[in-house]
Image (cartoon, rainbow, N blue to C red):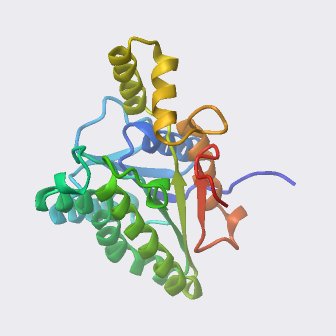
Amino acid sequence: MTMDLQLKGKRVLVTAGTQGLGKAVVELFAELGATVLTTARNEPADARGAHFVLADLSTVEGCDEVVRAVASKLGGVDVIVHVLGGSSAPGGGYAALDEDVWQRELALNLFPAVRLDRALLPGMVAQGGGVVVHVTSIQRALPLPEATTAYAAAKAALSTYSKSLSKELAPKGVRVVRVAPGWIETEAAVALAQRLASEAGTDYEGGKQIIMNSLGGIPLGRPAKPAEVADLIAFLASSRAAAITGTEYVVDGGTIPTA
């Protein structure tokens, strides 16, 4: 048996593909021969073989811009990987989350996937197949009340939306799956660990341990690498996973303490 994922020539849209997990996904799909379009709010120094469109996906206009780019640069799409997500919510628990914060968290973590899917899925159905990967988060099951309530709620909504979508689209030949990472050692995560280490008077490894402790520990002893999560996404998008739909795959080094 070979592990050729048969992604060569596939038309792939990856949101937030200029850094962190998104960048790893873009680079892997391009390496495997796919034609990739990615998007972000800032122009990348190097898109590494991918088409790029500048857009703010937290807005209706930004999503519309990406839909037009899919048509003009790809001529349609076979795989959509919704990586976009994050949080700018302040600490302080629920009382610190005003109307604007809630709107921002939903606008970034839920609505871009909903809008892009609504625009692009009819084309997948018409061509008789496609794959959608929604990147959720273990925070949907393991929220941190001090700082991630709104983000976790938005990711939980994305997960539920994704499950419903999978049930509707599977009979039409379109698979919808979810990948729920825990802590990933991205550029942003490295910067956070370094800042915490500096504040605590320790080194980078000590800063990482502070983050792991805040999550209740990671049995594996380390965060996941972006490339490790990207490998799973590529497999799920491939014909090797043709019987997989509607499920969520956790990549967290054992962080969630229950089955």
Residue 93 placement (x, y as % from top left):
26, 51
Q: Is residue 151 left or right of residue 126?
A: left
> Relative to 30, does residue 14 appear above or below in the rendering?
below
Taking the view exactly as shown, the residue that stands out farthest to the right is 1
- Residue nearest the observer in this picture, 116 or 215: 215
How many discs mark residues in the rendered view?
0
Q: Is residue 76 visible?
A: no
Residue 16 placement (x, y as % from top left):
35, 47
Q: Is residue 236 visible?
A: yes
Residue at 23% x, 48% y is 89
Q: Is residue 243 left or right of residue 184?
A: right
> Relative to 111, does residue 207 appear above or below in the rendering?
above
**Which quadrant of the figure contains the N terminus?**
bottom right
Residue at 28% x, 67% y is 111
**Which quadrant of the figure contains the C terminus?**
bottom right
- Residue nearest the observer in this picture, 208 or 82: 208
Residue at 32% x, 68% y is 116
Rendered image quadrant of residue 46: top left
Q: Is residue 234 left or right of residue 67?
A: right
Residue 44 placement (x, y as % from top left):
30, 34
- Residue nearest the observer in this picture, 167 or 65: 167
Residue at 37% x, 58% y is 152
> Relative to 163, does residue 137 appear above or below in the rendering?
above
Residue 146 placement (x, y as % from top left):
31, 47
- Residue nearest the observer in this picture, 96 or 181: 96
Q: Is residue 94 left or right of residue 71?
A: left
